[in-house]
Each structure stands twice: as structure tokens, then as C-alpha cells.
Amino acid sequence: APELRTATGEALEGEEGTARGQQGRWLTTATGVKLRDTDHSLKAGPRGPTLLQDHHLREKITHFDHERIPERVVHARGAAAHGYFEGYGTAGEICLAGVFEEGRRTPTFVRFSTVLGSRGSADTVRDTRGFATKFYTDEGTWDLVGNNMPVFFIQDGIKFPDIIHAGKPHPDREIPQAQSAHDTFWDFVSLHTEAQHHTIWNMSDRGIPRSYRMMEGFGVHTFRVVNAEGATSLVKFHWKPKLGVHSLTWEEAQMLGGLDPDFHRRDLADAIEAGAFPEWELGVQVFPDTDDQTFHGIDLLDPTKLVPEEIAPVQPIGKMVLDRNPTNYFAETEQVAFHTGHLVPGIDVTDDPLLQARNFSYLDTQLSRLGGPNFNQLPINRPHAPVNDMLRDGMHQHAVHPGVAPYRPNSLDGGCPFSLENQGEDLSDEQKRAFVDAAASIEASRKVRANPASYDDHFSQARLFWLSLSPVEKEHVVRAYTFELGKCYEQAIKERQLVALASIDADLCEQVATGLGLPAPDPSVAVADVEGSPALSQLGGTWPVD
Ligand code: HEM
């Protein structure tokens, strides 16, 4: 049984220590005063009225009134588990992070999620799934905040609020409650054709996973890793499930949505409770850190593009096992705070404009979701490495910081026990194990709001994906597009999406058009030519900057 703790964190000893909550000999107030009665309010006589003096009633009701915190603005519905990661020692050549050392075990916490539904929505809807992992390493916390699809809808994070506004339920009727079948989503992706690649993954069986235990995970962005000599490489992270990748059929997903909307969280918790611990291998695709940051012509900073495994195989660097269910959903699954900026020495970001925006967004949203700047002190977020920061005070501060001089250098609290001289090439071994931003080159002579021309191709990888599918997988994709677009009210949106499909593959477009009872568009027509569409240059193509 989980250890019982008081509200201030001390383990209760003896009989109470192993009991479940509320089974100690005495119920107390929040301040530890023993109570004789929590079932009757204090009244003027047995028939009342209730007295304002009843501080226990007021404390109990007030606390209840504030039990809910805002749900996540995206990925609100999720389920999580504890586990460990074990390095294979194979990443040493490219990355100095201790977490990858051979045989080293690092505790992890993983939260799987849908993206668009609210906290109470169903598990089996067609949607992307989040796959966020917190590694509590000896060198600080590293978060790999990924999805079960290797690409994303947009190329620049400034458009994230827009795609989410389009994907969340309609502002007027609040339908649908989760992704699938609505006009604003299809309006957005048919106008922003950079979203077509991610969308075809959503329309494939990947959009309805059978189990969290049977999903791949992808870091999506290209990251920069640094080895002990200071040399850098570019990598993409991949989780490969030991059970293989499996999906529900659409009919199963639909039925489960009604019969068991908790299907995925139940499956994860039951499997772990039964000792069938889910397992993934972590692998990397490795690319040279060249100035142009492309590989075989693929721009590694464009998050709508993947690098086919045929040209860059995924090389295993460790494995993860999930072997313990959370004790308390709220304290752990709800309060966990992942952040792409939680990096450890040896792992750094690239200039992918989607990743750069994420690095701002997570801390910012958690400031309001978790009520102020001290949420890293919550048990689930506490680093397992020693913390020696100069962050002070703020709402919900739990630390009692000793000393008087939270600044450096200082002459009052022992001066500067550590050195800032970590520039240049003569780093001591200890300094190398501190986080140093990789000195990546940048090439710019002026500020612009623009995409590089390499971001203009929106269709060839969607076509590659379509062509990689087996006949039955293709049939599922056609049926998914037909079902989802069939639910749109606006005819013009269906027609515009058919034009986008024609740019992916004529056969795909033809089959969906037949399913919708619409004529397939003339293949020479582009989305930008459709009546009412703004020019592509205003929709994520290269903006004319001069
Ligand atoms: C959650 C923002 C793109 C994966 C979130 C949250 C925000 C956010 C605000 C809620 C966090 C919280 O309340 O704790 C953004 C922005 C993006 C972006 C601004 C683009 C600019 C992505 C991408 C991925 C991703 C590309 C996957 C590679 C996740 C996951 C969660 C999440 C897995 C759930 C974390 C959890 O389980 O607590 N994102 N996101 N996001 N995001 Fe993103």
C-alpha cells in the first residue's frame, strides 16, 4: 500500500503509515486538529439555521469549492504511469548525457493523451496522441514531449493558437467534443496545406491506436546533441513499442467511445497492475550537424517533414519499462508539468520555429494552470538531482531557503562556490557536465517574418505516406476522409479539401470524392485557385518580404 503522508509531506508512522487515506484513528482539520464529527454542521438546534461560526464546515466546503484547476489548454485528457529508462551505452559517441550510459537506470513518468478533447472526453476518438516522458536524471530533469505521429500540422509555432482554435469544438455549439468531423478543422487544413501531411496520418489507422502500449512515439523536431568532445549532431527521437504498432478499427473505436470511453486508460492501468509492463525502445536517427541542416534534401528544421527510416535508420539507445500506476490521478497525472525546455547537458534544441515557440509556451501555460511559479516543487515535478537555484518566494512556495544573498557574486553567503568560466574550449570535466548552450551558427543579416523556400513543398511526403500503405490501410484512409468530410456542413470546404487531396494523389481524391457524392476536381487546379481562397503566399508559403 502506498505510504500515507501528512499534508506537509512527512510519512505517518505505525498503523496510519500503511493505511489508505482516512483510515487513521482520527480525522483532523487541515491544521491537524482532531475532529469528533464531520457529518453534521453546527446549527442553532437540530433544525438550524447553520451557524457562520462553523469553521470546520467552512474549511471543508471552501476546500471543495477550489478542488478543480483549469484543464490543459490542449492534451487535457490523459493517463500516466511510472517506470524507468535504461541506457544501452550506444549513444556515447554523439551525446554526453548520463541518462544514455550503459545500464544506468533513470526513473521516468509518462503521460499519454489525446490532443483536442476535454478532460472528460472519450479515449478512442480519431486524434493525435501525446507521448510525454519525464526522465528524472541525476543531471536534472529531461522531458521528451512527443506525439504518436512523426510530423506536425504547422511549420511555425505562431500558428499553434490558430490550428487549435480550428481543431477544438466550435465556439458556438461546442461540438464535436473531440477531434473528428467538423467544419473549422477542415477549413483550416484545406487552407493551410502544410497541415495535409499530419492530417493524412490522422486519417490513417494511426489516428485510432488500439492501446497506449502499442503506439510509437516521436520527438517530431530535430534536436541537437553534444558529445564529450563538444562535437554536435542532429537527431530525431523515436519510441518503438515492444508490442508493435496496432490500431482499432473505426467500428471498434466508435463502439468503445460509447461502451467504454475510458478504454485506453483502463487498458494501461490494468496491464501494469497485472504485471504486463509496457516497454519501448528509444532510438535516434542521426544526421550530421551541417550548416544547412538538411539531409538528402529534407529540411531538418521543418516539423511537417520526416526523414524516411530507409535513408536514416533508427538506432536503439535504450529502453523504457512502465511498471507502476500512479497513486493519485490529480497529484501525479494532472499536476505533472512537461516542458520542451527541460533539457540536460548534452541535449539541446534546434532553430525549428515550432520548437522555439513551444519552449516559450509550456512554462507560460503552467504558470496559470498550476497557480504560480513554484510548481516544480510539487512531488511529481521535483527533480531527482540536487537543486541550488536563486529562484525565491512566489505563490505556493514550499522551500524554506536559508541564507540572505540569492544573487551572485556575493560576499555574504560564501561567495561563488561555482565558476561561470564555462566558455571556450578548455572546459574541465565537471564544467562539461553542466548545461552549455551549443554554439550553433546562425546566418542572418536582417529580421524577417518569412519561411525558407524549403518549407514550400506541402504534398510530397503526404503522397509518400499514402503510397506506403497496404490496400486495406488505403481503404481505411479513404473511409476516414469520407466519414469526416461527410460531417461538414459547408460544401465549399469539402470541395477545397478534395483539391488538396488531388495534390496528394489523384486516386485518393477520386475515391473520397465518390464517397462524398461529389465530382473529383480538375487535377490542374490548386488550392490557391479555388474561389474564395486567399493566395498561398498568405497561407504559409514564402511571404514576399521585399
Ligand atoms: C501539451 C503548447 C506543439 C506535444 C501542451 C500544452 C501546451 C502546448 C500549452 C499544455 C501544457 C500544460 O498545460 O501543462 C504547444 C505549442 C506547440 C505545441 C505552443 C507548437 C508551437 C506540440 C508538438 C508536440 C506536442 C509538436 C509533439 C511533438 C504535447 C504533449 C502535451 C502537450 C504530449 C501534453 C503534455 C502532458 O501530457 O502533460 N502543448 N504544443 N505539442 N504538447 Fe504541445
Image: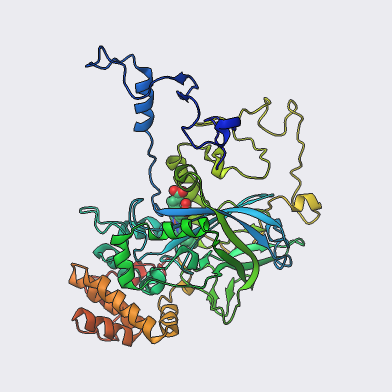
Percent x, y of residue 242: 56, 70
Q: Quadrant of residue 175?
A: bottom left
Which residue is painted at 38% across and 68% down in the image? 208
Is residue 140 rendered to the left or right of residue 352? right
Q: Nearer the viewer, residue 139 or 450?
A: 139
Percent x, y of residue 418: 76, 40
- Examine the rendered structure and indicate whether residue 108 appears above or below residue 28: below
Percent x, y of residue 160: 40, 58
Q: Quadrant of residue 264?
A: bottom left
Q: Nearer the viewer, residue 114 or 410?
A: 114
**Residue 290 visible in rendering:** no
Which residue is painted at 46% across and 24% down in the image? 28
Which residue is painted at 33% across and 14% down in the image? 53
Which residue is painted at 74% across and 67% down in the image? 93
Percent x, y of residue 313: 61, 77
**Residue 349 visible in rendering:** yes
| Quadrant location of the N terminus in the rendered image | top right
Which residue of the protein is positioned furthest toward the top in this rendering? 44
| Quadrant location of the C terminus in the rendered image | bottom left
